[in-house]
Amino acid sequence: MDSTEQIYAQVREHYSSASRTAAPKYGESVAKSFGYSEDELSNIPEDANLGLSCGNPLAITSLKEGETVIDLGSGAGFDIFLAATKIGSSGRAIGVDINDEMLARAEKIKASRGSSVSNVTFIKGNITSVPLPDVTADLIISNCVINLVPYEEKNLVFKEMYRLLKPGGRVAVSDILAKKPLPDQLRKDVAMYVGCIAGAAEVADYQNWFREAGFKDSVITDTQADLNVYLDTNEDGTKKSGDCCGPVAAVSACDGGDEAKKATPSCSSATTDSSDVGRSDLNEFVGSYKIFAVKD
């Protein structure tokens, strides 16, 4: 990958495309594989689930009536709509996203739900500099988004989480982290970056950024979820037959395919060569992690 601004431009382009997709069965299948229950999915607007999750951050901590929740990188509102059902009308559910088309989709969904989501607000902002006051939130969540921030700026996200949290506030994040140093070829691949793979930091990095931001402790655990679900799932939610794993499969599955396939993690118009890295199982390099921290 190139400069920070070029990375952000690629991410914006990719998720603008994702905002225009509609493959509810694919999204449902992916969400279930990462721990969302039937009951939870029934409480989330179907159009908000684009199949971009890598975990269920709300399963990491409990929410109380009247709390304020901020979702960093809220997309079409998948997790923040679910949070809104748990905090009641006295609570606040705030989605933060930089992508205009994602925000437009989220606002359209909100309008269609009427008063049932009156406690939901969407604002435009980069998660490295959130346009909200200090000590706003009881809980900050994020789902497969921090890995998209350029490495040089990832630490800013943790500083923002600390700033935004009230004393005793919690962080509950699902993200893709690297299990080992990633090969340069993989790091430089655009398709793998916008697909949440090439930008993955290691556990030690996250632990350091939490400490530097002011958090005393953090708990980071590999959920052992199979990341090839993105590649092995058809648009109708059924499992693909035959082999389909790794970066090469991810890109070839998108070439000439429909919008839903183009929007899935690890997909873009970029190409990946047929090296050993390209043929490898995604799970060899990265994993889905649940991340929890508390501000003292």
Image (tube, grey):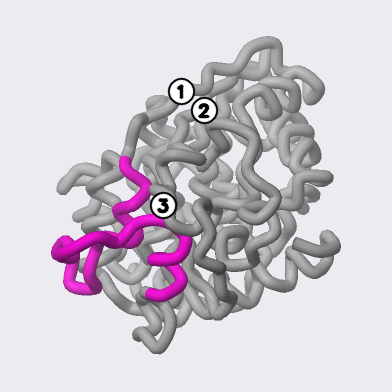
> Which residue appears farthest toward the front when viewing the image?
275
Give the CA separation, mark 1 to mark 2.
7 Å
Residues at marks 1 and 2 touching, judged by CB atoms closer than 8 Å = yes
Viewer-side residue, 288 vs 69: 288
Question: Marks 1 and 2: which is nearer the front?
Answer: 1
Q: Position of residue 90 (x, y in %)?
A: 46, 41
Q: Position of residue 200 (x, y in %)?
A: 61, 44
Q: Position of residue 79 (x, y in %)?
A: 42, 50
Residue 148: tell me if it is visible. no
Q: Quadrant of residue 21?
A: bottom left
Mark 1 or mark 2: name the one nearer the start of the chain.
Answer: 1
Q: Measuring 55% from the left and 58% from the top, which residue is drawn there?
A: 121
Residue type highlighted by circle 1? Thr
Residue type highlighted by circle 2? Ile
Residue 221: give its label: 1
Q: Quadrant of the C terminus?
A: top right
According to the image, label 3 marks what residue? Answer: 53
Residue type highlighted by circle 3? Ser
Mark 3 or mark 1: name the one nearer the start of the chain.
Answer: 3
Residue 291: give its label: 2
